[in-house]
Image (cartoon, rainbow, N blue to C red):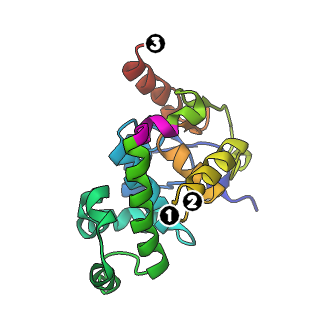
Amino acid sequence: MTDPAKGPAIRHSDGKHRCPWPGTDALYVAYHDDEWGVPEFDSRALFEKLVLDGFQAGLSWIAILRKRDNFRRAFAGFDPEKIAAFDAAKIESLMRDPGIVRNRAKIEGAVASARAYLDIEAATGFSTYLWDFVDGRPLANAFRSLDEVPARTPVSERLAKDLKDRGFKFCGPTIVYAFMQAVGMVNDHLIECWRHEACHAAFRSTDGR
């Protein structure tokens, strides 16, 4: 039997067709409608999403989404300067925080990533650095079913390698592609999903073209 979560867009009770992956979970649907795929150009917001995607490794995104407010509290609002200064005592306190994912390697990886972020931000700006990998414009796809969507691409592989070389952790090509989808560097809303064209429009409104 075909998994409906891997199939085409589904029609919801409000009459709108959506990508199948959020199902009907209200929080997940709101994230799909309001955030996922919208082009993000704020460096700090991009950093937060990349770190959270790293915490997602081996888990589901909805699990992280339900803990996102706790993560923001625990990680100083994802202020990279503050995270970069986390010491061993702070890491131990985070390991005792039931509101987040208590994985030492991922917590220490977030600290290392914050330090790498600061270097990139000072040199070129983190947002500029990331968006240069797609020439400053979202890559537009036209998939009709979720099983057509790749888990990784040559672009995500190049970006993942460069991030790793610069000191980022938990940034393999699959994680990076999920990140690219989420922040609108690639538009992977299915072609029949009502958000597909809306995300293109969101980019045009900020790009002026």
Find out whether residue 11 is within the magenta segment. no
| Secondary structure at numbered mark 3 | loop
Which image quadrant is residue 80 in? bottom left
Contact between marks 2 and 1 (CB within 8 A): the answer is: yes
Span colored in magenta = 123-130
Identify the mark nearer the N-term, 2 or 3: 2
Mark pair 2, 3: CA separation: 32 Å
Count neighbours of disc 3 (C-alpha within 10 A) and say few if under 14, some if 14 to 19, many if 20 or more: few
Mark pair 2, 1: CA separation: 6 Å
Q: Residue 184: horizontal and vertical position, in percent?
A: 49, 37
Is residue 89 shown left or right of residue 14? Answer: left
The quarter of the rendered structure image containing the N terminus is bottom right
Q: Residue 151: horizontal and vertical position, in percent?
A: 68, 53
Contact between marks 2 and 3 (CB within 8 A): the answer is: no
Residue displayed at 65% across by 55% down: 173
Q: Residue 65: horizontal and vertical position, in percent?
A: 39, 62
Identify the mark nearer the N-term, 3 or 1: 1
Please tell me whether the stretch drawn in magenta is mainly helix, strand or loop. helix
Dot 3 amino acid type = Arg
Residue displayed at 40% across by 14% down: 208
Q: Is residue 123 above or below residue 95?
A: above
Identify the mark nearer the N-term, 2 or 1: 1
The residue tagged 2 is 171
The residue tagged 1 is 54
- Decide if residue 182 is in sight here: yes
Residue displayed at 69% across by 59% down: 3
